[in-house]
Image (cartoon, rainbow, N blue to C red):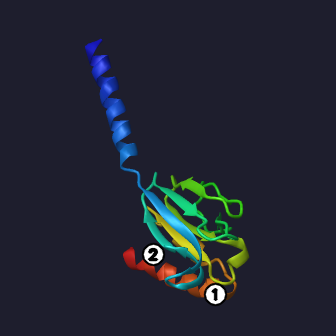
Amino acid sequence: MRKLIAMLTLGAAVALAGAAYAEEHEVLMLNKGEKGMMVFEPDFIRAAPGDTVRFVPTDKGHNAETIKGMIPEGAEPFKSAFNEEIVITLDQEGIYGVKCAPHYAMGMVALIEVGDPVNLEEARAVRHAGKARTVFDELFGLAVAAN
């Protein structure tokens, strides 16, 4: 009986220790930031599986949603309401492309790299309109440089 209790206690401690190491990343949705108008700040996040990302609508008129073709297989797409905070937990390794729907062509996009970027080439192949294309070229440069 003592061994069973010891094993259960050890298992619970290990599980809680893993949860304690999960990090929360905060992304601001801004009309004006360090990189210009209509931006996520930061626009590139390197996360570990199990981390969370909190998108905060600092300025009104923004949302955060995944871009079709730019999420890992098995990951759930997400889409916030306008002017609403959203918190997502990133369990699947890979690249996640994020946009603000009304400001997408203006370049309001972000890239999240979770663990091993298993879908890097697929995500990179997605075509983008307007300034989003230029911003993603820069963000993919950051992801590739680290790998």
Foreground pick, 21 / 75: 21
Q: Residue at x 66, y 84 (%)?
A: 106
Residue highlighted by disc 2: 143
Residue 116 showing in the rendered view: no
Q: Quadrant of the N terminus?
A: top left
Question: Residue farthest to the top?
Answer: 1
Q: Position of residue 21 (x, y in %)?
A: 36, 49
Residue highlighted by disc 1: 131
**Pointer 1 or 2: first along the chain:** 1
Q: Residue at x 59, y 74 (%)?
A: 30
Is 66 on the left-hand or right-hand side of 6?
A: right
Residue 137 showing in the rendered view: yes
Placement of 18 over or under 1, stated as above or below:
below
Foreground pick, 12 / 53: 53
Q: Residue at x 67, y 69 (%)?
A: 60
Placement of 69 over or under 138, stated as above or below:
above
Q: Position of residue 141 (x, y in %)?
A: 46, 82
